[in-house]
């Protein structure tokens, strides 16, 4: 599996890069405001800030240090599943959330990606 590390505009050597656990990263069809909000929140994570509700919540069902970032868009609510590592913010998945619960497919896919990443 190949990983994409995004480290553009890192202002400090202490900023963590974003590591995307997908062979190809396609930007979801975010509106401009949702794209700006997602970027703003991910930037905070890169700088070492911990996010809390309503922006983020822990996802221990996926793994330790895993969280779900909430991005509210015009007609959808997006979720970005991520893990905070000591050296990076690892992006596991992005999906449109339509129900109160996280789909089992997303949980299983995120766990699998983490296992493969940790084993590499």
Image (spheres, grey):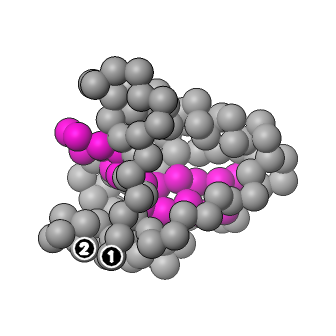
Secondary structure character of the magenta stretch overall? strand
Q: Secondary structure at mark 2?
A: helix
Residue 111 vs 100, above or below: the answer is below
Q: How far apart are the two marked residues, 2 and 1, measured between alpha carbons?
A: 8 Å
Q: Mark 2 Cα within 10 Å, few/some/many (few <14, many 20+)?
A: few
Q: Is residue 117 left or right of residue 26?
A: left
Residue 86 in sight from this viewpoint = yes
According to the image, label 1 marks what residue? 1
- Comparing 26 with 37, the one in front is 26
Magenta segment, which residues? 77-97
Q: Residue at x 41, y 58 (%)?
A: 4
Residue 35, picture quadrant: top right
- For this orientation, the residue located farthest to the front is 8
Locate the N terminus and report the quarter of the image it occupies. Answer: bottom left
- Figure quadrant of residue 92: bottom left
**Residue at the location (28% across, 25% down)?**
13
Whole-percent x and y of residue 9? 48, 29
| Viewer-closest of 31 and 12 | 12
Residue mark closest to the camera, 2 vs 1: 1
* Up/down of 22 relative to 14, above or below: below
Q: Is residue 67 above or below residue 51?
A: below
x and y percent of residue 65 in the render?
Answer: 28, 47
- Cβ–Cβ under 8 Å for marks 2 and 1: yes
């Amino acid at each position: 599996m190949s990983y994409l590390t995004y480290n553009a505009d890192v202002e400090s050597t202490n900023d963590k890069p974003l590591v995307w656990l997908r062979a190809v990263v396609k930007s979801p069809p975010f509106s401009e405001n949702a794209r700006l909000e997602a970027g703003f929140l991910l930037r905070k994570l890169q700088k070492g800030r911990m996010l809390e509700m309503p922006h983020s919540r822990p996802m221990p069902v996926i793994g330790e240090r895993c969280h779900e970032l909430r991005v509210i868009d015009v007609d959808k609510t997006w979720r970005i599943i991520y893990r905070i590592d000591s050296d990076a913010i690892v992006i596991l998945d992005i999906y449109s959330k339509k129900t109160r619960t996280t789909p089992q497919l997303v949980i299983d896919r995120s766990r699998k990606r983490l296992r493969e990443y940790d084993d590499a």
